[in-house]
Image (cartoon, rainbow, N blue to C red):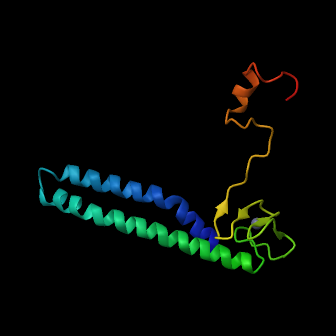
Amino acid sequence: MLYRVLRGINEIYPQACLGLFIVLFIVAFVCTMAYPMVPIILVISSVYLVIIARCGYLILRALERKVARRACARGVCPMCDHANAAVVGVQFEGVFSCTGCARVFTAKGDLQLPQETSSAPADGRSDASARTSPTTPVGLA
Ligand SMILES: [Zn+2]
């Protein structure tokens, strides 16, 4: 539960910081003529706000990894809370994979996104371009 909350916060944190800085820019732009001290203060404080936002991101990521590592050490999937040790298995050293939700966690606690295992081409083309490509044999797909 705690991991999912931290994961959700980490997913919206960059967009929230960007929105905050856009709002501060609009406030500074609007106040340029009426209150000239507001843009000056905002420009000076924006440097410190960037540092604070970056430190907040690093702290949130560290908390997310710590919670994930602790759950993996107990044999519990951090995302779906499967308490059965057979559900969470070790693929290779330090990597945990959950068969319940198909999520993979590294030894550092990072969540790896599930890999595409379909017959998509390795060069990054989409399926539509692969179907219309003259190099792809028709009828084998
Ligand atoms: Zn899981």
Quadrant position of ligand 1: bottom right
Asked whether residue 91 appears in the rendered view, the answer is yes
| Image height of 136 relative to 2, above or below | above
Q: Which residue sits at x=69%, y=26%?
A: 129
Answer left or right for 25 relative to 54. left
Q: Farthest top residue?
A: 134
Tell me residue 28's x, y (percent): 22, 54
Q: As rendered, which of 99 and 28 lies closer to the eye?
A: 99
Q: As rendered, which of 127 and 122 lies closer to the eye?
A: 122
Q: Quadrant of residue 71?
A: bottom right
Q: Quadrant of residue 97?
A: bottom right
Q: Which residue sits at x=48%, y=73%?
A: 59
Which quadrant of the figure contains the N terminus? bottom right
Asked whether residue 1 appears in the rendered view, the answer is no
Tell me residue 119's x, y (percent): 80, 38
Q: As rendered, which of 32 and 62 lies closer to the eye?
A: 62
Tell me residue 141's x, y (percent): 85, 29
Q: As rendered, which of 99 and 62 lies closer to the eye?
A: 62
| Image height of 70 relative to 120, above or below | below
| Image height of 83 relative to 101, above or below | below
Answer left or right for 16 relative to 141. left
Q: Which residue sits at x=28%, y=52%?
A: 25
Q: Which residue sits at x=25%, y=64%?
A: 45
Tell me residue 113's x, y (percent): 68, 55
| Number of numbered markers | 0
Answer left or right for 104 relative to 8. right
Q: Quadrant of residue 133?
A: top right
